[in-house]
Each structure stands twice: as structure tokens, then as C-alpha cells.
Amino acid sequence: CGGILTVPPGGTVTSPNYPDDYDNDVTCEWTIAVAEGSMVLLSVENFHLEDTFDFLTIYDRGIDTITELRSLTGQVPPTQITSASTQMFVRFTSDHSVTARGFR
């Protein structure tokens, strides 16, 4: 899981096995890049992780900086997160117990 995505409008990122439960002890990292002059808009439509132990952390990735935008855990209603640059870095981590459906 993970990788570098040059995403056209409407690209999709999901947790491993989605819509089935993700596995324990997983770390996935994605870099999402868009054209110069654009920003990344991440729309979280479905989200259910083990609360407090499994996380989806979203970062804005500038030329020389990386800034955490949001860290999501548990159940989150639909939300949108926008980068300030042309790249967003997304990290999913799960611990050694309890899994859930994940995210899309």
C-alpha cells in the first residue's frame, strides 16, 4: 500500500482491503501531487478506524517543509482537507489489535 500518486480530479485513496477491514500493524504512505498552481483537495467520504490507536495523518508538503494538517482517528463524518501546496503526504498506521473498515 502507499506510493506516489499524480492524481487527476476524482482520484481515490483507500485503506488496505477497503471496504473490508484493514490488517493489524500496517503503515501506508502516499504522496499526492497535482499540477503547479493547483492544490490537493482530499475528501474523506467514509471513515472508521480504531479510536485512539489507528490514525490517518495528513500533511501539507511544501518545497522544504512538511506541516501536519489533520490527524484522524475513530469515526469521522465526511470532511474535506485542502493543501496549501501542490503536494499532500498521507500516512495510515494501525496498531497490533482491533481493526475496522478503514477509509475512502
Image (tube, grey):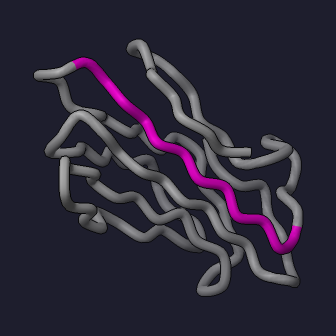
Farthest residue to the front: give it.
Answer: 64
98 sits to left or right of 73: right
Location of the C terminus (image quadrant) = top right
Q: Nearer the viewer, residue 38 or 51?
A: 38
Q: How many marks?
A: 0
- On screen, residue 52 above or below 91: below
29 or 55, which lies in front? 29
Residue 16, image x, y percentages: 79, 47
Q: Is residue 73 above or below residue 56?
A: below
| Quadrant housing the N terminus | top right
Measuring 37% from the left and 30% from the top, which residue is drawn there?
A: 33
Q: Position of residue 18 (x, y in %)?
A: 79, 42
Residue drawn at 67 percent across, 55 percent down: 28
**In the picture, residue 43 is in which quadrant?**
top left
Q: Which residues are magenta?
A: 24-35
Tell whether 19 sits left or right of 47. right
Check if residue 68 falls in the magenta segment.
no
Q: Residue at x 70, y 64 (%)?
A: 27
Residue displayed at 20% across by 50% down: 62
Residue 31 sits inside the magenta stretch: yes
Q: Is residue 64 left or right of residue 18?
A: left
Q: In this image, 102 relative to 57: left or right?
A: right
Q: Give how far across and how far down residue 54 sits, in percent.
A: 66, 75
Residue 78: percent from left, percent from top: 44, 47
